[in-house]
Each structure stands twice: as structure tokens, then as C-alpha cells.
Amino acid sequence: MKSADWETSHNMTQHDIALLLADAADEVKIGIAPAQALIRGGRRRKARRWAVVATTTLVVAGSTGALALTGLSGDGDRGMSPASRPVASAEASEPHMRTTLASGTDAGVPWRVYIDVWKAPADTAEAQATLAAMAEFGEHPEDVSTASELVGKVAHFVHRVTGKEARTTQIADMVLPEDDVLSGGESGTVSLPLLPGNDTAPRLVTGQVAKTAREVTCTWKDGTSTKVGRASAATEANAAVPVIHSPKHSPYDWFVCLAPKSTAFEGIKVTK
Amino acid sequence: MGVRKQAGDREFQAFVGGRWPRLMRTAFLLTGEQHAAEDLVQSTLEQVYVAWHRVTSADDPEAYVRRVMINAHARRYRRKLREFLVPRSEDAGLTHEVADTGDRIAQADDRHTLLKALAELPTRQREAVVLRYWEDLTETQTAEAMGCSVGTVKSNAAKGIAKLRAISGLAETVTLGGRK
């Protein structure tokens, strides 16, 4: 049959198929919409979303405080240019929006993870100024194309610095409404290898928790775990002990922990 | 929790309550199975929650949600995750008699025949048929939901309908004018 004939002679057929579809659709059990579960799931997705944008990498390099910028695409660990600024000196002169989340030495290799948090602009003019300031640090949120989209939102950029040559990789950006708080045991994480190149096990865990969380437990695939608590006199004395941080202006609290060399990340839970 | 966030959550809850039945039915036709339909709708609405401010400011929030659902369905297909479609062996070899349309057994049989036939359609044809003939969207709206051209919608819908008509049990029902 020609298609024109089919069209004219089977209008009824199509109508009937619509009726049959409606009939078949009635077979599904509708139930009650699990609105609260959907909201919890949505919040978890929101918290996880920043990991997705971690695939775009900006390499920030500099030796005297000036920042050079190279945009890269794809895996954040490939094709990075070494930066010349030592890890230690970067810590010594942190800009106002920067917080070091964790640092240490792994098998003789120094590493550090820091977060830049940019206060939510109140209006478009302020947003333009904020974007310009971010650009000076080689930062621009992926989800924001115009200044007005940044109004009322806090921008976060997480960077990983490794090695004596201070190879710096932006591993994530996340833009959140300033009142988008986490509550209870809600959390989000991203795990990735500590070192670029030949280290493939996801050992470096960066996460967000509610401001009320007092302790997070990171569990590793070998069955061991690491507890991350709030800062105390004891943790102040030992920089290698991971703690939960409250970066200024962020609606979330943040932490970083590192899995032992022989294992990898399995999960986290807010335990207090 | 911020005031704006609480208000947003309330709006979202109201939205979910109103749309849940329809979305479940559409997802059921797309996936062919209760649990897969629930998974698809939940995944869709969680994504909608994440982008809630965009949904509420969209010209057509319904279209936004449909697009999210079709994308989620297409992603599932691309990843070759198992779709829990109606088992093909369930009524293999059965012949379909033309029965009284008021007969509940025959009605259930027709449903299974249609769901089985839908399950056998390629994903894009299934999406086109469900959106055009169940959601009753225009070709343009269907194209927007599927992220393709109107021509592709026409082609997929026509092929899908032709294949449904070719299913013997269904053809008999359809030829007799369908269920009233």
C-alpha cells in the first residue's frame, strides 16, 4: 500500500491505537507519588552534580602570584602542564576566597586540595565583577553563560595540587543558590586518583556535608575507614589529620580524605 | 533551610502530586514494566528537582519534563541497560480470537499484545508512538521532546504504527474499530 493510501485509510487505525495505548497504560499501578523521596534524591543528585563538571580542566600555573591559564578538555589528569609554584608557598599567601581543605605527603609526593568560594553577587553588576575576579584566577563556572545567571548563587572551584612542581588541576566547579543548604546526613562526594598519570585508583575523596555534620566516615574498599571530624586543638597540631571545613559563603561544609595507598574509595556516611 | 528553598520544595511537591499518574502511565508504555516505569519517573523527577528553577521559569514546564524523561529513557537504551519489557515467550504460539470487546479476558489479552508489540519496537519508534498517540502531542512537540526533527518523528511514528498494525492479534482488534 502506498503511504498516502495508508494515511487516509488508517486514520481510524491510529485512533484505535491511541485507545489501546490508553487502555494498556491503565495497567500500571500508580501508587502515591513519593515526593519526599524524590526531593531527597534530587538533593543527592544536586550534591553529586559538581563531579560531572570535573572533566573540564583548567591548569593554573605561576611562580610569583601571577596566574597563567591553559584550558584543557577531557580527563583532568591528561596533558597537564607543570606549574612552577611550590605547594607550600601557595598555602602561605592564599587569596581571601581560598580555603585549603587538606594537604599531606603520599609516598614522598606532596599534595593539597583547596577550594575557592565566591560570594553570591546581589545583582548583575556585582556578578560581572565577580566573574572578572574569577577570571583572574582562571576560574569560570561551566553552568553560567551570562552574569545575570550568577546572581544569588555561590560559585565553588576545587583544585588539586600535586608534586614538588605544584601541578594544579581544577577538578570541579559547582554553582549553588546561596540558601541551598544540605541537612541531616545528606552529602555529596567525588573521588578521583590523587596523582595525574599512572595513579588510577580513586583514592582522593572530596565531599560536601551539612553544616550540622560533626563527623564523616569514609570507607575504603579494603574494609578500613577514616573518620573526618571538626577541627580541634589536636587536629590543628597535625595538619595531616583531615577535618570538615566551613569555607566562608558556602552553603555546604567540605572535607577531603585520602584512601591508603593499597585501596580505593567505597563510600561515605555522616556518622555524627 | 532557606525560605526560598522551602517554597521551592512545596511547589515541587505539588507539581509531583499532579503529574505523577500521567508520567507513570507514559513511562509504563515506554518501558513495559512497572518497576522500570517507577525508576524512569523517579529518575526524571529527581532531575527535574535539580533544575527546578529552570522548570518553573520555562515557557512550557510540561515540555521540559517530557524532554527529561525521553532523554533518560534514551540514555538507558544507549547504555544497553536491561529494559524489563514484556516477555516475548509469555504467549508465544497463541492465536488471538476476535472476542467480545466487553470481555475482560480479551481486554487483558489485548493489553499484553499491545505492550508486547510496543516492546518489540526500536526505542525511537516506541517513543514516537507513545508521544504522538498516547501523550497526543503534535509532531513538533514530539520532535522537541525527542530532540530530533519533525521528519524523524513522522518516520519513526509511521514505522512504529505500521509494525503495531502488523501484529496479528492487535490488527484484529484495530480492524474491528478498537475498544470502546
Image: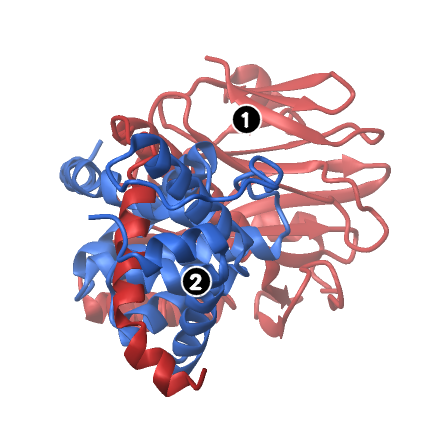
Are the residues tagged 2 and 1 within 8 Å (C-beta)?
Answer: no
Q: Nearer the viewer, residue B35 or A131?
A: B35
Residue A47 position in % (x across, y down) = 43, 40
Label 1 crowding class (10 Å Cα cut-off): few <14, some 14-19, many 20+? many
Give the chain coloured blue. B
| Helix, strand or loop for disc 2 | helix
Which of discs 2 and 1 lies nearer the camera? The answer is 2
Q: In the structure shown, which secondary structural element does the residue marked by tag 1 occupy? A: strand
Residue B62 visible in the shown view: yes
Q: Residue at x 66, y 21 (%)?
A: A219
Residue A79, position in %: x, y?
76, 68
Q: Chain of mark 2?
A: B
Q: Is residue A236 left or right of residue A22?
A: right
Q: Residues within 10 Å of mark 2 (few under 14, many from 20)?
A: many
**Dot 1 amino acid type:** Val
**Residue annotated with mark 1:** A243
Q: Residue A228: image x %, image y %? A: 57, 21
Instruction: Residue A155: tell me if it is visible.
Output: no
Q: Residue at x 27, y 72 (%)?
A: A11
| Residue topped by disc 2 | B165
- Asked if A7 appears above or below B40 in the picture, the reply is below
Q: Is residue B159 above or below residue B21?
A: below
On-image quarter of the N terminus of chain A: bottom left
Q: CA distance from mark 2 to mark 1?
A: 64 Å
Query: Please, what is the three-letter code of the amino acid marked with disc 2?
Result: Arg
Supply the letter of whichever chain is red: A
Residue B83 drawn at (x, y percent)? 56, 44
Of the pair A254 and B3, the residue shown nearer to us: B3
Q: How many marks?
A: 2
Q: Give B101 or B2, whichever is nearer the viewer.
A: B101
Which label number is shown at residue A99?
Answer: none
